[in-house]
Structure formats: C-alpha cells, structure tokens
Image (spheres, rainbow, N blue to C red):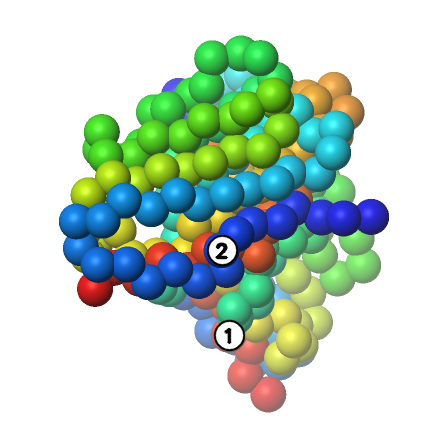
Amino acid sequence: GENVEQHPSTLSVQEGDSAVIKCTYSDSASNYFPWYKQELGKRPQLIIDIRSNVGEKKDQRIAVTLNKTAKHFSLHITETQPEDSAVYFCAASYNNNDMRFGAGTRLTVKP
Amino acid sequence: GAGVSQSPSNKVTEKGKDVELRCDPISGHTALYWYRQSLGQGLEFLIYFQGNSAPDKSGLPSDRFSAERTGGSVSTLTIQRTQQEDSAVYLCASSLPPAGGGEQYFGPGTRLTVT
C-alpha cells in the first residue's frame, strides 16, 4: 500500500515569510495529492489538491508542486499570516482510492 | 446540504468495555474512511470502504477493532475490551466515487476517553 512521509513535523515562520512543507510517497501509481488544513479543535479541510497530469497548481497564496519522477510534492504558502497557523496534512492516492495521509506539519506563524 | 455526522461527539468508557462509534456519510458518497487522531498527532488510517468492494482493513491496530458499513451508507466502528491507549478522536470521512472528485469531507469526530 501507499506510504506517505511528511517533513518537517513542526515549522515556525515570521508573518510575511514563506513556508514550505514537503511530502514523499511510495506508490508510483498514485495520481491524486490533496493537502488538508486542520485548525485547533476542528476537522481537517481540503485547501488545495493536484493530480498527476500537472506539475504545479496555485490558489492565491498557496501552491503545490509535484515531481512524479522523484515521487515528492510540496506545499508552498507565501506571505504567511497568523491565521495560517494550523496543522497541515498531505495525502496520496490512486484515483482517490485508499487515501493515505502524512503525519502532519504544525505550522506556527509568529506576528 | 448535510455534511458527515458522527455520534456520539464524546464518549467516556471504562477500561474493558465495548464501544460503538457511528458515522453517517454524505448521501451519494461511496467511499468512507475511519481515522484515529491522538492528541497533537497525525491521522492514523484505520479502515476504508469503497462501494460494495471488500474493505481495506489494513490499518486496524488489533483484532479488538472492527467496522462495518450497512447498505453502503452508515458505518459503525466497534472497539471491544477498550484500553486506555484507545483514547483518541476518531474521525470519519467520506468522498465521491473515484471519478467524481477527490475531496474527503470529515465529520466532527468522536472523542473517546477510556478511564
């Protein structure tokens, strides 16, 4: 089955700086890679996703890049704000079957 | 529309007792997942149902854990002879069929405390 590793486990940045979270996956058949944000005490919610037919996707201050050859993908948050503070999870699956999550990254944005 | 619901929201039980946790997925979502999340930790995959296919039970931590999904809709996660290390938030998520989209919609979770 799929195995997803995520780094770093914690990340602290100054407001306005960029934050990058990286994930690797093991199953070369995986073709769907979502990112979820979980604020304290709340359920995870999808913030962006990418499919294997593209290498990069942007949505305002967040972007995700995918390197299929190396089997890794990254989340980039620019101009970070305190409200970006949360735990972020990457995940990987084949056609949304049998999704597996990374262990999470706790992002703290210091004002 | 209605999202994923879970019940109970909180459950306190004594060590050794059995518990049942319920998940009502979004109507039309054929995929249903159970995850466990200990305090400050990640999402630990437990079990995955997809339509009428045999479930992927590879994440269940022991034979004390089981789950079923009746009629392709409601799912129940059962933990027998609960232990203190079972204390966690149990999250359920559902999603559309594979070709219909990728987003998993999470329920609010059930916080299980084993005393």
Labels 1 and 2 positioned on one and the same chain: no
Residue corresponding to mark 2 = B8
User: Visible in this render: residue A71?
Assistant: no
Distance (Cα) linking label 1 and label 2: 31 Å
Pointer 2 local density, CA inside 10 Å: few below 14, some 14–19, many at least 20: some
User: Visible in this render: residue A12?
Assistant: yes
* Rendered residue at 71%/48% (across/down): B3
* Left or right of A10, for residue B2: right
In depth, the one of A28 and B24 nearer the eye is: B24
* Left or right of B16, for residue A61: right
Residue corresponding to mark 1 = A108
- Residue A39 found in image quarter: bottom right
Pointer 1 local density, CA inside 10 Å: few below 14, some 14–19, many at least 20: many
* Left or right of A63, for residue B14: left
Q: Which amino acid does label 1 sit on?
A: Thr
- Residue A81 found in image quarter: bottom right
- Dot 1: chain letter: A
Tell me the element at label 2: loop
Residue A93 in the image, given as x and y percentages of width and height: 55, 27
| Quarter of the image with the N terminus of chain A in it | top left
Residue A57 in the image, given as x and y percentages of width and height: 75, 42
